Each structure stands twice: as C-alpha cells, then as structure tokens.
C-alpha cells in the first residue's frame, strides 16, 4: 500500500516557520515583577476613618499542606517593616500590641501542593479503517497524574476596635494576596508591599 503525501508549498512552510519563531509566549516572556498579581478586598461596611492606631504581628504565619508554624527571616522582617511604613504614610499611628490598637495586621505565607488526576481520552482524529465505514479507533482512556503547587502571601487587617465579643472573633476588614513567580525574592519585597496599599486608596485617613 502506498503512503499518501501532502505537498506543502515552500512559501507557506517558510511563513509558518517564521511566525512560529517570532511569536512570543505572553506568559513565559513576562519578567518576574510583571508576573506578580495583587488581590485586595475590603469590608464595604467598614469605616476606616474610625481607626487611628495599629499594630503588626511580630512574625509570619507559615501554612504548608495543613501544617502551620511561625517564622521570622530577614525577608519576613522586611515585609513586616513595609507594612508599618505604609500604614504610617496613610496616617495611622503605630503602637505596640499591648497598647490597645484599633486594628492589627497579620501576614501569612501559604504554600500547598496538590496531586491531581486527569482522564485523557484519545479521539478518533485519524478517521476509520478502510472497509469499515463509520468505525473509529477505539483507544481506551488513560489516567495521568500531575502535581501543582500554589504559593502566595496573605495580609489581613483585623478590627480590634469592634471585636465580636459573643463569638470571640475579630472582623477582617481588609485583606490582600500576592501571587506570582519568585514571591520570596528580597529585591521585590518593597514593590509587593507598596503595591497592596497603592491598590487600596480607601485606607488613607483624611
């Protein structure tokens, strides 16, 4: 049996090669800083003008696959210092945790690894077998296992002034997440922290 070959004009082949070689991957071509994504959210019922003083936790809560603990690396210190500096610039007064602050800021590093399972069927793209019209190729489905990891920074602002004394909880009036590549890079810590507050102008005291 002879193989059927499809001839592609040289000009078209050259164009396809040129486009493939010159096109950019919009994700992989991002710089580390450009890959950073910031999410901020607030309690729309909260009146931030009522808060005057704040405190910041003295360490970072680290959560990894349902395990948690506290850490204080040089990077962590820089991040916490950045929170203090930004809050001061917004008009808040920094006090110690025992001085009854109106609000408190905490920072957490969360890193979880997930094992995923995907069922991948093989389609009958290549058509039927000669002499058996309407029949496709009956490949069985197979399963592929793959691992994904999600890491991000989480900053939360707790309302100490209006604590829920009945349920013994502090309302979260603002939180922010930082995601992207290399989010533990010391050279990016100022950029990351500053961006959270730039994106939240409603926190500024009048």
Image (cartoon, helix red, strand yellow):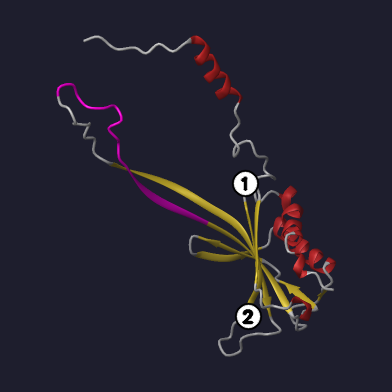
How many numbered callouts? 2
Question: Which quadrant does the C terminus fall into?
Answer: bottom right
Q: On the image, which quarter does residue 119 sit in?
A: top left
Q: Report x, y in % for residue 6.
A: 37, 13
Q: Report x, y in % for residue 16.
A: 52, 20
**Picture layout, residue 187 above or below residue 99:** above
Residue 199 is covered by the magenta coloring: no
Instruction: Give the magenta part as a residue range.
Output: 112-131
The span from disc 2 to disc 1 (Cα, nearest Å) is 32 Å
**Picture layout, residue 75 above or below residue 57:** above
Pick the residue in front: 114 or 127.
Answer: 127
Question: Which quadrant does the N terminus fall into?
Answer: top left
Asked whether disc 2 touches disc 1, contact meaning CB atoms under 8 Å apart, the reply is no
Residue 18 as seen in the image, left or right of residue 52: left
Report which residue position mark 2 lands on. Answer: 170
**Picture layout, residue 149 above or below residue 19:** below
Q: Report x, y in % for residue 139.
A: 24, 35
Pick the residue in front: 200 or 127.
Answer: 127
Report which residue position mark 1 lands on. Answer: 181
Q: Report x, y in % for residue 151.
A: 57, 54
């Amino acid at each position: 049996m002879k193989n059927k070959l499809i001839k592609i004009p040289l000009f078209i082949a050259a164009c396809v090669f040129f486009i493939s070689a010159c096109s950019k991957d919009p994700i992989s071509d991002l710089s580390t800083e450009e890959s950073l994504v910031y999410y901020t959210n607030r309690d729309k019922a909260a009146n931030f003008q009522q808060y005057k003083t704040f405190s910041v936790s003295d360490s970072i809560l680290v959560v990894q696959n349902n395990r948690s603990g506290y850490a204080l690396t040089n990077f962590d210190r820089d991040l916490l210092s950045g929170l203090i500096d930004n809050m001061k610039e917004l008009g808040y007064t920094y006090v110690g945790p025992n001085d009854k602050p109106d609000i408190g800021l905490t920072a957490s590093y969360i890193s979880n690894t997930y094992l995923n399972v995907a069922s991948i069927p093989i389609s009958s793209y290549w058509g039927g077998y000669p002499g058996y019209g309407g029949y496709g190729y009956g490949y069985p489905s197979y399963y592929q296992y793959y691992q994904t990891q999600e890491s991000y920074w989480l900053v939360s602002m707790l309302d100490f002034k209006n604590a829920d004394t009945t349920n013994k909880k502090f309302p979260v009036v603002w939180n922010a997440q930082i995601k992207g590549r290399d989010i533990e890079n010391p050279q990016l810590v100022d950029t990351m922290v500053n961006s959270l507050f730039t994106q939240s102008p409603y926190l500024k005291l009048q």
